[in-house]
Amino acid sequence: MSDTSAIRTENLNLFYGRDKTNQALKQVSVRFPANQLTTIIGPSGCGKSSLLKSLNRLHDLKLHARVEGEVYVGQDPIYRSREPVPDLRRRIGYVSQKPTALPMSIYRNVAYGPKIHGRPSRQELDELVERSLRKVNLWDEVKDRLNAPAADLSVGQIQRLSLARSLAVEPEVVLCDEVTSALDPISSERVEETLLALKQDYTIIMVTHLMPQVQRLADHVVFMYLGDALEQGPASEVLDAPSSERARDFIHGHGGGAKSPSGSVRLASSG
Amino acid sequence: MNRRYVEQYLIETLIRLSAVLVVGVLVLIIGMTLYKGGQVLINQPSVAFTAPGPLYLLGGSGGFLHAILGSFAIVLPATVIATVLAIASGLYLQSDYCSERFARAVNVLLYVLWGTPAIVYGVFVLTLLIMLESRSSLIAATFAVSLLQFPIIARFVDEALKSVSADLKETVYALGTTRFETLRLLLRAALPGVVAGVIMGFARGLGDGAAVLFTAGGGIEMPSGLNDPATTLPILIFQQASSAYPSVREDAYAAAFVLMMLVLVLVAFSKFIARRFSRFAQEDH
Amino acid sequence: MAVTSLRSGRRLLLDSATKALFQLLTWVCIAIFVGLALVLTQQSLPVLAENNVADILFSGTWDPEAGQFGFLPAIVGTLITMSVSMILVVPIAVLASVYIAEYARGSIRTLLSSSVDILAAVPSVIFGLFGLLIVAPLVDEVIAPLFGAGSTGLGLLTASLVIAVMTLPIIMSLSVESLVALPDSLRETVLSLGETRSGMAIRILLRAAGPGILSAILLGLGRAFEASIAVAMVIGGKNLIPDSLFDAGQTLPTLIVNTFGEMMSLPETRSALLFAALVLFVVVTAFNLLASFARNRLERHWRYQ
């Protein structure tokens, strides 16, 4: 089975705080199958985003954040690897919850990544920018104003631009952190369509707290609860027949708004 | 591909060197003042506590007590005046009393004044003195220093008042209070910021030489009356540093030691108050 | 009922009384500062009546007894010291700000940012002493011989170095502030493209914080322009157009400081110096307004999102 997983974690622990008092991930061992869309779900504060960010070493930025265990991309351990972290991160793209435009033109937003990694010719860059923007269905909307500041776009467009920007460096895996949470329903739908189209070529890992979105998109699901990965497996299995009570409550009771851990506990005791 | 890591190494080296340079400059300045001034003060501690002899600036006997007392005699009342004006205008500019347009215009004026060179205030007060056929004196210097301090303190007052939440204001008004009663409460909530600003203004007044250079008189008399000349530590240091007598130049470091200590203690105190009480303010919400 | 209305009547009276008092004091402040501008202008009229403005600004001769008040040496000195000090201080201040905002952690960060705070609080006269004791010998014994120039240690280069140190904390504290204010999502996004930390700082963060840093530099320029006492201590004070950076010179503020003895006695010199103060006031105000304009305006066009 391991040959089909693009990325997997092994006994991953994450501690926050000066004296490691706050444990955000507890012995998490999960795998994310290649060329599938995996969603990480669970109540707020359960460690979804923490898990996602540990997959391309974004916790390195934080003071007092400590990672133990290992993450394998293919066969390569990324925390023990000698590969420079920037090269590693190129292979694992990331789109943040907050739509983020770099302070430059639309064109240069997409061209920025390829330019730092090599010296593509003007023609190669043009093609790459167009291809990346087409993949996220943004090309037609922006092709006439590629030199306008990216910040002039709408939030929904900026989010698709962010996706195009990550794709332009040709990653193997794309991490998406609640990418639709800042968007209106129509923009969300467009981003979802884009993600569905992309999973033929990429492994996509997405954090979300919207169960309908999970049902629409997910091939594979990981359920997190208070830092533990309680469930993982193909979407049909996990969604239809969750083995743990917590997951069952979350998945079925989600419409009731059980977004906080305490909310789920209350639901569990009353059910 | 390797090019990027060479670039990273070079840039990070430059960044680190710059940071080291900044700390180095600070260490040099503080170290110089403490070491040179400390030497003088240890050999002859009395310079800070005795009045100058008649030939003090020509290498004669005595100390610079007159400048220490003069600094306080000028800057303390100046701070009081500037604080009263800053609080009055700060409260007035809250939307309750005047129109928003007026408040915005005055705020631009305050911003301009905040950046106005101290020497301009000094020259202005000196010109007034000449027009009034008066002469440099303690009170003239007090006026000049309060001009310098007013915009500084006013800015702190304004920021402190703004940081008190609008909710609090509405809540208090809803109890049926008048504007004055509301603002009194607002001022109480903003007090830590205001006090920090007053102390900062006091420190700036103590450290400034340009506003008082022409207006205080700058002799070697002890401060005696409002209309008599006085001197402050920065003026004294300026005079001592350009002296032809080595012993006088050495004393400049002793005076600088005293001035630096006063200012640093005040700034530390102001930061302490701002930090200490900001916690209470948060709990209030 | 009667008691209540009496009481609320007194409260309302107090309210109007304090309003009147606040209003009066606010207008006193405004009047004083309008008076400042008027007095400076009115008092510089005599020298402007006798001389052409262009003559004053572009003549190199400063000879009060002959009635010649050329500001050119002071203006040239001001421009030179300002540009040299900015060339020296801007790269160092910006890079050190990047260190504080992006690299330094924990106690080192506290140490560095308190260093900046302390430096900002040091009285300017102490910067002057620092110039005399440390910078002047450095220029005299190390830098001047390096260029094969003669020097007394007091001159434009020494003044520029002192100004650079004085403006360092202003530029740094505002630059650090605007870097720290950038959202983490920007950092995560850029790093995820495979960018190095230093590349991110130089290519993206400095750009995104650009408006704030630009306004910090303009405020620093304003401070450089007004530095009077400290610069007067180290610039040498000569009203001649300098030939090299090692020459003694003059800036507009030091012109006022160094000739203040004459001000009292000669009305026309006084008028000329008040004109210098007026020029100073106008230019510094322009810089400060430009700085706030830069921050407000550019932030809208040059934002990161």
Image (cartoon, rainbow, N blue to C red):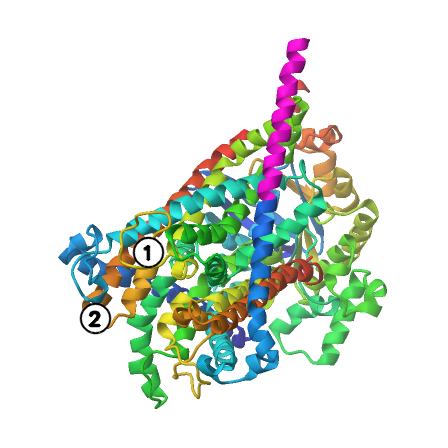
- Residue B245 image label: 2
User: Which percent across, then down, holds residue B284?
Assistant: 54, 30
Which residue lies most toward the front here?
Answer: B133
Q: What residue type is labelled 1?
A: Thr
Which region of the structure is painted magenta? C1-26
How many numbered discs, if any? 2
Q: In the rendered image of this protein, does residue B115 appear above or below residue B21?
A: above
Q: Residue B102 at x, y = what percent?
A: 69, 46
> Mark 2 or 1 closer to N-term?
1
Quarter of the image for residue A147 reads bottom right
Magenta span includes C2: yes
Please state which of residues A257 and C136 is positioned toward the viewer in this rendering: C136
Residue in the foreground of this view, choosing between C254 and A126? C254
Residue nearest the viewer, comparing A196 with B149: B149
Q: What residue type is labelled 2?
A: Tyr
**Kind of element beneath mark 2:** loop
Q: In this view, does C237 lie to the left or right of C95?
A: left
Q: Is mark 1 on a helix, strand or loop?
A: loop
Q: In this view, does B45 lie above or below C21?
A: below
**Residue drawn at 65 percent across, 12 percent down:** C4
Residue B231 has which mark?
1
Residue at the far top in the pictured view: C1
Q: Residue at x 56, y 79 (%)?
A: C57
Residue A61 visible from this viewpoint: yes
